[in-house]
Image (cartoon, rainbow, N blue to C red):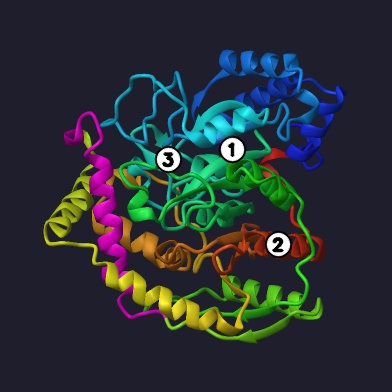
Amino acid sequence: MADLTTAPTAVDIAAQVRSGTMTARRATEEALARIARTQPAFNAWQVVRRDAALAEADAVDARSDRFALPLAGVPVAVKDNVPVMGQPMRDGSAASDPAPQPRNHEVVRRLRAAGAVVVGLTRVPELCLWGATDSVFGITRNPWDRERTPGGSSGGSAAAVASGAVPVAHGNDGLGSIRIPSACCGLVGLKPGYGVVPSDLGAGSWHGMAENGPLATTVADAALVFSVLAGDASYATVGEPGTLRVALSTRSPAAGVPVSKEWSDAARRVARLLAEAGHRVAERTPRYPATLMSTTTLALWTTGAAADADLFADPTALEKRNARHVAIGRRLAERGHPKPGARERWRARAEEFFADTDVLLTPTLAQPPIRAKAWSRGGYLATVQANARYAPFAAPWNIAGWPAMSVPAGLDGAGRPLGVQLVGRPGSEATLLAVAAQLEQLQPWPRVAPSAR
């Protein structure tokens, strides 16, 4: 394959298409060629919209306002759990309706209005439930290590970007589904806070926990796509963070879940970099409620999934493990779960913690990515245990509804990416992006996996 380490970013492509030094059609043709090369190895794509994407690109080239489009001609991937008009929305499931969708989700409309070209839809696990991406449609693999998962549930989007097929992708995050795959694949991934980007996911966006956001290889690209999704151009300009109060925590929010030394050491290295840059860094951990990662998460997760499954054309065709998950959710819903008090108590503790903290820094994962295999054919408890053991850090901030992102933080001893999570108060997305950009300068990361070079 060609060396993609210097391939144009989304910022580069948009600038060239706006200026006329590149056409949207050429950018799209190049992306389609990269998809054709990488799809057999990584299985990132559910649908490749070759003819439709080329037609979209030609339409961008013909637009009289092309010079003003923030994403002019940028090839993007869209996660296969939001409607894209004219395409099925399979949500990783044989139980879903294979008929073409009659409308575009608002985030798809915004991407296209900004000049982006949707080249395809990316793989997800069924109902977007898990931190590994496999389903009846096959196993998606990590471009950094094909034996490992690219994470989930935005695993197809992460694999598409990390393989160099596209510079940016859409994802969404209900309990870590942007941050987990970003950490697995060495990417920048932002979960916005509640209400910043339209969600409208499934039956109720998992009780308002799920948010749409970007996955990218650079902070500037993530900020640009986020600005379009949020409908606020100011986010595209990443400023300086100033001097911040940063709390470092390497303790898992889930009792009894160990954090590997390589992942905790990565967070400590980043903390030292921030301290050397002038930030006030101290080691502190939020007071996570004892039941936060057990009963509270279980109630929200299972009842949200049950509501989504009710939208499927044939719920009887669910994977066996997910049918069990949905059945638990239905029983809990009948008993009045989830109870709002648990979330409110956790938000109160988070507010208390952030009274003298601007940014919380944690590892994004507790362990390396789990194996890429047919988890969908295995048992329910095995899947739950594997997911809980490797990815406990993300969920608390979905439950709170606060912004959080994953940023690359070097490589482990096996040459796989490490990542750190940055968390802030509601409304702090610009601050998190500024800190991430500072880290990108202090500790640059490879933009794509070695397999793409």
Asked if the residue under mark 1 is in contact with the one under mark 2, i.e. CB atoms within 8 Å, the reply is no
Residue 16, x across and y down, in percent: 83, 29
In the image, the segment drawn in magenta is: 288-316
Picture quarter with the C terminus: top right
Q: Label 2 vs label 1: CA separation?
A: 22 Å
Q: Secondary structure at mark 2?
A: helix
Of the two numbered discs 2 and 3 in the rendering, the one whose residue sits closer to the viewer: 2
Residue 258, x across and y down, in percent: 44, 76
Picture quarter with the N terminus: top right
Q: Which residue is mark 3?
A: 124
Q: Which SS does the magenta portion mostly show?
A: helix
Query: Residue at left 56%, top 44%?
Result: 158
Crowd rating for badge 3 (residues with CA inside 10 Å; few <14, some 14–19, many 20+): many
Residue 213, x across and y down, in percent: 55, 47
341 part of magenta stretch = no
Crowd rating for badge 1 (residues with CA inside 10 Å; few <14, some 14–19, many 20+): many
Q: Which residue is mark 2?
A: 436
